[in-house]
Amino acid sequence: MANLINRIRKSLLWQGITVTFVLFFSGCFLDSEMQPFYGVAKTPKSQEFRWSDGGLPKVFDPALATAPPDTDAVRALYEGLTEFDSSALSAVPALATSWSSSTDGRTWTFYLRHDARWSNGDSVTAHDFVRSWKRVLNMGQKSPNARLLSNIEGAVPVPLPTASPKPTPVVPEIKLQAEVAETPLTPTNPKPEPTPTPKPLGVEAIGDYALQVRLDQPDKDFPNLVAHPGFRPVHIETGSEISSPTSISNGAFELAQTGADGVILKKSSNYWNAGATQLERVRFVAFSNSEGALAAYKAGEVDAVSNAALEPLAIKLLSPYSDFKRSTYAALTLYNFNQTKPPFNDIKVREALSISIDRDRISQDVMGGSTVPADKYLPDNQQPKNTPKTEKTSTWATNIARARALLFQAGFPDGKGFPKISLLINRNEQQRVVAQTIASMWKTGLNIDTEVVARNWDEYETALNTGQYEIARRSVVMPAPDERIIISMLFEVGLPPVSDPVGTPVKVPDNSASISPPASRNELPANVGVSQAETSPIQNEAAALKQFAAIPLFFASSYALVKPYVSGFETNLQDAPSLKSVKIDPDWEPPAKPKTVWWK
């Protein structure tokens, strides 16, 4: 009886093993037969592009649009002097067929095409650009894009009036001048300096189809900058430079419908290159969350999903599919030094703090692999392919031994005597974990203590803009591949920060190594420099890198799902696909399913 029971048990055991074997390997074959695309990929019958772009466009004014989906709609509705090559991010002709610059890079002339039309049939001329750019400047701080024009000669954005201004007594101007002239000059009452005459705006229409722009500072990348939506013209009449633009546009598409259920753009028949535009309609659709957008994409209800707040787990699950696209986004998170406060005015201290951070660990562990480690200020391919790259440095790699040597040389052996760092961040759980991880790295590697100071957004922004910090976290979205404008955004005082990308914090173990400092200056590594200029002006990335002006941490990533029957939808650093290039391929067919081979 016992033998019979044992035989039955063995039989059942082998049956279980066999079932498990079959299920396991049949699962593998099922995986091998899966389509390489996420969800349904059935070609639509019409040239209508259904796009979930993180929401519905609400702003259709080039002066006000700053982020998708608004900027995507503006780029489709309006065309500027130049356009981005979506794959290379270099300037290509748009309304301007060509351009030239003076030898010093301060005067640019753009030659406009003669066949460009507004959607009402009017010609697009250089005068439209003059009026539109003046309008942006006249809007002052109401236009977030006004500062992009700040390098144009005479471009001074009109400031917003302060709340409840005190009444000013009316005094005739001639009387005021007489009083000043009759006032005796004393050391405490010097002669007032004459008010300098403002320069005229350096934007001039040289005829109807040539636009000349004069800059204060040379800018070799200016044709890239004017591809930004903020430089695109709007249809306004002379003298109405502060009014809202009409619905008349000059791009490849016109606004056909707006509402809570969607925004629809239709192909413009008056666009100069309408024959090359394949799409008949673009339909922006919105969902309450990213899960809804992914479900609609999987069901074949939308053709593309972008600007969705994807969790790290969703990113990992989507990564194997060929229609899932990931690219570096030109948005940098960095830590700014307040160099007016010792010891952060010492380049050796700044370098020591910078190179004691393990950026790979921050991106992979803390940020869940959703960011790209940054050892410079401009991401790869930020500059156009034909533009000489800024010289990069490898000294930003994590190097605890060098960091400790630099700190020793700065007078803080083993961190002794170094004041506790105050690290300012905005109140955000993800940024708190990042800050605490970096504080742990500084403590373990350099024996430096750090207090993480989290403030609500208004308090954080005020402290940042008034210099009330020692080290502060910032995040900057780079508006165009223009080195001059990006460096000015990173290092000019008083620039507003931007909101944080969404992410999930991850707890990180402390595995940094502790290294003892050298016993004396004679034992310092030979490559520790002591003679770098610490106060040279920051004019480009090379100077910023040399001065360790700030600590770059990571670049953001952008993600998109694009159906395989869609072509021309390019993901890039600026997160700026061109709808003019997008088309639905009616002949696309899914690949044949692979045959299951059980044995050879």
Image (cartoon, rainbow, N blue to C red):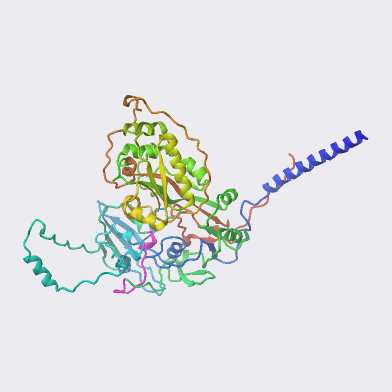
- Look at the image and tell me whether residue 479 can be seen: no
Main secondary structure of the magenta stretch: loop
Viewport quadrant of the N terminus: top right
| Above-or-below relation of 224 to 393 | below
At horizontal 37% and vertical 41% (from top left) the residue drawn is 420
What range is drawn magenta here?
A: 227-241
Residue 311 vs residue 131, the one in the foreground: 311
Taking the image as shown, residue 594 lies to the left or right of residue 396, namely right
Q: Is residue 413 left or right of residue 257?
A: left
495 w.r.t. 260: above or below? above
Q: Residue at x 14, y 74 (%)?
A: 172
Q: Quadrant of the C terminus?
A: top right
One can see residue 247 in this view: yes
Task: Assess whether residue 232 is covered by the magenta stretch.
Answer: yes
Residue 287's x, y, as percent?
A: 56, 63
Q: Quadrant of residue 99?
A: bottom left
Q: In the displayed image of the protein, which residue is found farthest to the right? A: 1
Q: Please tell me which residue is depicted at 38% across the width and 52% down the height of the picture.
A: 481
